[in-house]
Structures are given as structure tokens and as C-alpha cells.
Image (cartoon, rainbow, N blue to C red):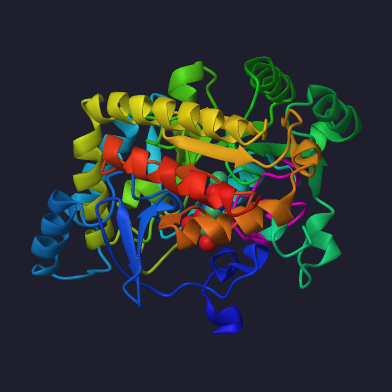
Amino acid sequence: MPGGVNSPVRAFKSVGMDPLIMKRGSGCRIYDEDDNEFIDYVGSWGPLILGHCNPAVVEAIAAAAKNGSSFGATCAREIELAEMICEAFPSIDKVRMVNSGTEATMSAIRLARAYTGRNKIIKFEGCYHGHADAFLVKAGSGMLTTGSQSSPGIPRSITEHTLLCKYNDIESVKKAFMQFGPDIAAVIIEPVAGNMGLIPAEIEFLTAVREITSMYGSILIFDEVITGFRLCYGGVQNITGIIPDLTTLGKIIGGGLPVGAYGGRREIMDRVAPQGEVYQAGTLAGNPLAMTAGIATLKQLKDGELYDRLEVLGYLLAGKIRTLFEAHDLYYTIKRLGSMFCIFFTEEEVYDYESVQSCNTGQYATFYRNLLNCGVYLPPSQFEVSFISSAHDLKDIDITLEAMGKALDMMK
Ligand code: KE4
């Protein structure tokens, strides 16, 4: 396999290591093939909000597997999960299930272009929306670890329709609309960016983006693949009240199995085949096992209690990390939102792609390797987000802090 992995960011390139080969997970812990145990803050990059092998999820998948793994026809589980998503997201009248976040965002853009009859899209530097051609322009996530933010193999005729703006900078958006407004089909944004580390969009900025897209009749797409059901039983849109026209989802709604989804207002979604003429399809879309895992996950999140627990754990962990780093004379920027956090190895304020370049990625890599040797597994890149799950508890937080202290001492 190229690089020994099936996804670049797993290659541990930016932390100067060979990729770990994982064998199993249990609760908040993950074990590699040498039976090394780690407290896991990667959580499969977001899906495992309940931790590894959540009993109800495992039981549901096992039972569903006995009825078959795939039908290639609609099954009741697809309808059930679609209804749960529409109920959780007031902005979603209709939803289409796909197999990955990339499929979700790729399809949402196609739909927006068809609905508006326009070609251009706006994305933001440092945001990552999966690996579809149109998005690999100054993208975040794994693209920030490979040293190049754009990929070869993508014709100019595609990327010429992708306009790049600066996150949290409405002037850059206004400039793009001044120049191309009538041809801008969509603006796609992570309302909380999780692919250049954790960078929340400022409310004023998001509000202004909503206003300008409405004014020009462009489709606003919130890419909530990470944030969907992560911060609340819904999305960032439920918290901010800033409502997109389309939303893309993934990760948590599949409970660890392959999944993606896109949805929005009825008059837009009705354009999707076979109801409309915008073609999108998938052999395993709405797969019964993935739907089952997603339903079993969302059912445990719905009463909201786990979000309160995650908020307390996140608050405590981030505060203790800040105190620990300051005790080592490191006044680094630590950002935390609910159960998502990121330690930026910089003392500068970070609010967009450019400012996160001030991070000392070499120092992050040293800290990372030390911490791994002390039994704690953070994302193998400065430009990702760490996730706390409901399987973490206060004891795990203490063990994590002790390990971080040792990792920092080893850097003296
Ligand atoms: P997938 O195609 O990887 O399921 O989803 C793409 C995607 C879309 N939108 C957002 C906001 C995303 O964060 C992602 C994927 N996230 C990365 C990690 N930040 C996945 C990890 C990987 O690429 O291996």
C-alpha cells in the first residue's frame, strides 16, 4: 500500500515515524500489534464519540449482520437514520446517504451547481472537505502534512472554478463576490474548522457569509462532517442559529462504519436523482450495517446527557493542559470546543490558515513521539483535532496529564 497506509494522514510522516499498525480498541484505549496500549484521542478522526467497541453499537451491528450485510435496495434502517438526521437538523428537510464525507461534499457541490446553474465555488484556505478534485486547492488535514496544499492530477479546468478565501476574513469573501458573484454556485465552509487544528469561525464572520450568499443567491454549505453530532445533538448550526442551505455529514452518523450524507431544503434536495436530474449513486449507500451503527450511536446521544459529560471532561483537560504547559514555560495556544481540542505549538493567536503556520511542527513532532512512548495517542499531525469520547473518564485525564508532563520533561 502506498506509504503503508490507506489514507495519508495515518502515515505519521509529519511526526517523523513509521505508521503504527493498530490491532484493537476498547473504550478510550487503542492497542497496536505489539500490544502497546494508548489512551486514544484520535477516535478514528471523529466517528468514535462513544469510544471503541461501545457495547450497544457492537451488539446492534452483530444482530444486523445476521440479517445480511447489504441489499442494494432500501431498508428500514436507512429510513430510520434519515428521519433521525432530519429531526436533529431543522435545516434538513431531505437527506441522501453516501459512503464517505468526500462523497457527501462532492455531491453537495454538484447539486449546488445544478440548482444555481453556476460554476464557481468558494472554499477557505486550511479547510478540508475530502479529496474530490474541486477541493484540493490549499486544503487542510493530510494536505498540510504532505508539504503541498494542492494535488497533481487535477486539470486546471476544474480548479479554475475553485475560489480561495481566507477563513474568518469577510473582506476576502466580499472581494470574490465582487469579482465573480453571479457565477458563484456555492460557498462551502467548516463552521468550526477541524483540519488546520481547531479554529472556530467567528460568529460575525459566519453571519456575514450567510448574508452575502443569500444576497447573491449562492448556496451556503456547512461541512459538518466532523461537527455533526459532535458538539450537540445536531450541528454548529443548531448552536449558532446560522442556517445553511445544505449540510454535509459523516463520521459519527455511521458509528465507525463507512458513511456520509448530504441534506437540506426540500426544493434543493428534490433535484437529486431519481426525483430530479442531478445524478449521484452508490452501491453501498445506506448500507444496513452502517445505518445500524449510526442509529445505535445517535440513540445514546439524543438525550444530550453525554454532551454535558464531554463538556466537563473537555473543560478539565484543556485547563490542566494549559497549566501544565505554562509550568514548563510554554504559553501555547490551546483551543477547546466541547470534546474537541488542539494544542497549537505557538504562542501566537491562531484564527486562520496563515496564522497556524507559526506553529513549531518540529517541536510538536518531538512532543508527539515522547507522549506516544508514555501511552497517549494524539493525532499524528499538528493540523488535526483531538477528540474526547464518552468512554474517557477523570482517571484517564489524570493519566494523560502525567504522561504529558513526562513528555515535556523529556524535551528539556
Ligand atoms: P472522508 O471522505 O474522509 O470520510 O471525509 C472527508 C472530510 C470532509 N469534511 C471534513 C470537514 C473532514 O474533516 C473530512 C475528513 N477528515 C479527515 C481528518 N480531519 C479524515 C482523516 C483522513 O483523511 O484519513
On screen, residue 259 versus residue 147, left or right, reads left
Does 255 appear in magenta? no
Among all residues in the image, which is located at the extreme bottom? 1
Q: Is residue 295 visible?
A: yes
Does 126 appear in magenta? yes
Q: Residue at x 62, y 42 (%)?
A: 197
Residue 277, image x and y in percent? Answer: 52, 52
Instruction: Compare residues 128 and 399 and report the one nearer the observer.
Output: 399
Instruction: Compare residues 239 and 35 and report the one nearer the observer.
Output: 35
Residue 333, image x and y in percent? Answer: 65, 31
Q: Quadrant of residue 370?
A: bottom right
Location of residue 124 with respect to 1 vertically, above or below: above
User: For the N terminus, which image quadrant?
Assistant: bottom right
Q: Is residue 103 visible?
A: no
Instruction: Compare residues 331 and 327 and report the one nearer the observer.
Output: 327
Residue 38, image x and y in percent? Answer: 37, 59
Location of residue 18 with respect to 45 vertically, above or below: below
Q: Quadrant of residue 164?
A: top right
Q: Residue at x 25, y 64 (%)?
A: 73
- Magenta residues (range): 120-142
